[in-house]
Amino acid sequence: MRVRALAVRILNQLRHDKRTIALMLFAPILLLTLLYFILGESEPTVNVAVINAPAGFMDKLDDSNVIASRYSENQARDALARGEVVATVNIISGKPYIEVDGSNPTKAKQALTALQEAKNKVEGVRPDLSSEVTYVYGYEDATLFDSFGTVLIGFIVFFFTFLVSGISFLQERTSGTLEKLLSMPIKRWEIVGGYVLGFGLFTVLQSFLISTYVIYVLNVTMVGSFGLVLLITLLTAMVALTLGILVSTAASSEFQMMQFIPVIIIPQIFFSGLFDLPAAIEFLEPVMPLYYVADALTQVMIKGNGISMFTRDIGVLLGCSSAFMLLNTLLLKKYRRI
């Protein structure tokens, strides 16, 4: 009887906790649906720019599940810089000259394998001449961690900053500290600014430590400026910080704060650019902050570009953190009792 009574009490608690019910029933379905669409793609999409090649060369690439398109030499170089193609090929006097974007080692190897197979099967290409391969970005022996490391830096900073800031702000609210602050002659934006500045100073140390460890201890590929990497990770932390504070207003306990992780945090990694997404869900990528973080870090760490190549990413991250700060300021009004 006591066991049954305890079970009934637990069920009654769950029945009144709609957030927990939604998490248990719908969050797994959401994540499984994302995995179905993402992992359902049997082959990654590999695009190659063909500048000059004999007849039938592009057909052989298509047979290897590589999408080949005709480009002029300047167009091909621009497409490679923008990440629209994985490799360019220009066959001169029967010898292939190939330029490769090695930022994604899997795609780069697939493109090179397809180009080699096409070279051996098409007339007009001399099989006795070795292809001249130039890695414009990355390098031949790059590992998957070199590709994933850039995204993982952003994700780890985003995840832990979101979690710590959200739980800390929640504790301020549930302990009554926030209510006491709101009873004082202090503006709401000053409260938000104070919390952001306080946590922000800590995230400077966090960003420096994580970036230094990944780049100089784990030896992930690093071509560009370490200062720019720190700038991007700091902006990432600011977005996660302001989002964590915002989400904490909807939670009444640390457990409820944790419940937002499968819905808000985990999907970020799926839309960060690590995976080739089908058209059905690809449109969701630009609404995920981590997508812009990953792009900016890739531009710096793997491609060695300056800030001019990812100003859009910087602008979006600044816009997100500003918008979240504004929403936090507006939502604080409901806690003011005077």
Image (tube, helix red, strand yellow):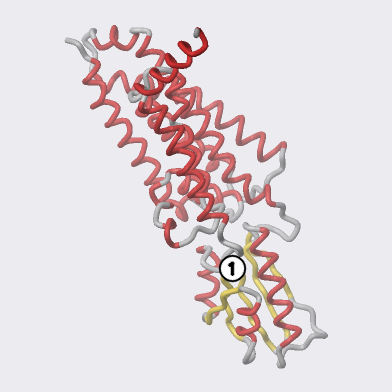
Is residue 296 visible in this depiction of the protein? no
| Whole-percent x, y for residue 230 in the image | 54, 37
Determine whether 95 is above or below 272 in the image: below
Residue at (46% x, 29% y) in the render: 162
Which is more toward the observer, 70 or 271?
A: 271
Q: Tally the numbered discs.
A: 1
- In this picture, residue 322 sits left or right of residue 281: left
Determine whether 203 is above or below 181 in the image: below
Question: Which secondary structure lies at badge 1?
Answer: strand
Furthest-left residue in view? Answer: 338
**Circle 1 residue:** 46
Residue at (44% x, 20% y) in the render: 167
User: Which image quadrant for residue 128?
Assistant: bottom right
Residue at (53% x, 50% y) in the render: 35
Which is more toward the observer, 89 or 55?
A: 55
| Whole-percent x, y for residue 194 in the image | 35, 19
- In this picture, residue 189 sits left or right of residue 255: left
| Whole-percent x, y for residue 328 in the image | 30, 27
Residue at (45% x, 19% y) in the render: 254
Furthest-right residue in view? Answer: 128
- In this picture, residue 321 sits left or right of residue 123: left
- In this picture, residue 330 sits left or right of residue 282: left
Which is more toward the observer, 35 or 279?
A: 35
| Quadrant where the C terminus is found in the figure | top left
User: Which image quadrant for residue 132?
Assistant: bottom right
Determine whether 21 is above or below 83 in the image: above
Neighbour class for label 1 at 10 Å: few (<14), some, many (≥20)?
many
Q: Tell me the kind of residue under disc 1.
A: Val
Is residue 335 visible in this depiction of the protein? yes
Determine whether 211 is above or below 111 in the image: above
